[in-house]
Amino acid sequence: MEHTYKVGISGSYGGFNLGDEAILQSIIRRLRATIPVEITVFSRNAEDTRKRRDVDHAVPVRHLLRSEVVREIKGLDLFILGGGGILFDGEAEIFMREVLLAHELGIPVMVYAVSAGPLTKRAVIEMVHNGLNGAAAITVRDRGAKRILEDIGVTPDIQVTADPALLLEPEPIANDILLKERMDGDRRLVGISVREPGPAAPDIDRDSYHGLLANAADYMVDRYHADVVFIPMERQMQDVQNSHAVLSKMLRPQHAWVLKGEYTAGQLLSLMGHLDFALGMRLHFLIFAAIQNVPFVALPYSPKVQYFVQEFNIDMPPIHLVNAGRLIAHIDYSFDTQDALRSRIRELRPGMEERARMNNRIAIGVLKGDYAKPDPAKKQNC
């Protein structure tokens, strides 16, 4: 009988963010489609993970003592850190504890399609440096993360792959959902994603970008005869509140609303297939739009958003410098050239999806002991 591998996965999981849940779902599906595997997720909300994900075990890692974490890790064949944007000053230390314990126990570690930065605190940099230098394999989802990790002295080869969420598949939704969410009307439908400043985007001025997005939403309502639906990616955090704050500043609020239901990542992906256009801040909102070939304008609050948009050679307005007129001009140009945008997304996305699949192939190679690290003399150009 074929050996069943035991794999632990640690990331920002537990139902808080649909982008992170899309990443976890994709990692699990790829593993289960490839090998017999017993999966343990180190989760912020173990009960939510057990309920929503196809896992064998979920542990509330942030509530466990060191000795309890050791018991969970010591029987693993591989410990996966990632994916997602978890290596930044506000949270990297939290995730490094399990990585360093895995090293102590002799458990191979794969860093799986992460982003990195900002990393400015000496203690955090040292922990990330020590944790990643002991990894069996490291993949990142953008060039910027690779540069940041190289700059802090991470020496194992770092491969640039792509976000696992690019492999997410749409899931069925009930027949009456479009009616309930007012997404079945005759007017064009524009989706907007808003986020809070938070530790990953500390320099955003809340009032400024709320006003900016309200002006843009009003313009699209009038100019394109559109309805606007705000799509929260983090319902339990502040996406809903920030969406309502933008809505409250609009002059045409009768043509705008916030998505009400709670959906899985795959269900939200299905809903986004009904959009005609998208304007967004959150990375995975833009990834979902790309999967559904929805033309989009990004407001790049973070380098990870910039790097994703650059993959499609799409221009983007600088959120810290743009005013309402400049953003509207950008939206107008993108709307007028939306057919070309769709064609470009359709053409370039398969290459990104193939890079996303590389993550699983590398993980399987580490598990089976036949992962060949790239030759340092042949550095990646990507």
Image (cartoon, rainbow, N blue to C red):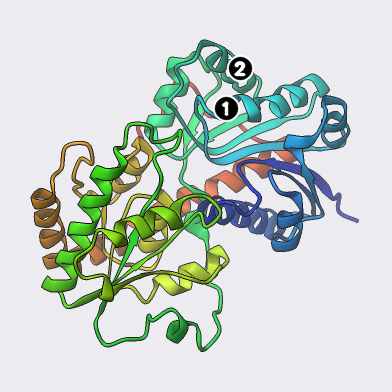
Horizontal side, residue 75 vs residue 220: left or right: right
Q: Rounded to the nearest whole Å, what is the CA distance between mark 2 and mark 1? A: 8 Å
Judging depth in this view, the residue of 179 and 362 nearest the camera is 179
Specify the amino acid type for callout 2: Met
Asked if residue 279 can be seen in this view, the reply is no
Q: Which mark is residue 379?
A: none
Q: Give the residue displayed 40% in from the left and 24% down from the top.
A: 147
**Where 328 sits versus 196, above or below?**
below
Q: Is residue 64 visible?
A: yes
Residue 266 pos. (x, y %): 54, 67
Q: Quadrant of residue 130?
A: top right
Picture quadrant of residue 52: bottom right
At label 2, counting other C-alpha atoms closer than 10 Å, the crowd grade (few under 14, some 14-19, many 20 or more) is some
Q: Which residue is label 2 attached to? A: 127
Lower sequence index among marks 2 and 1:
1
Q: Dot 1 corresponds to which residue?
A: 92
Identified at 27% across, 44% down, the residue is 207
Nearer to the camera, 21 or 148? 21
380 to 270, vertically: above or below: above
Q: Are marks 2 and 1 in contact (CB under 8 Å)?
A: yes
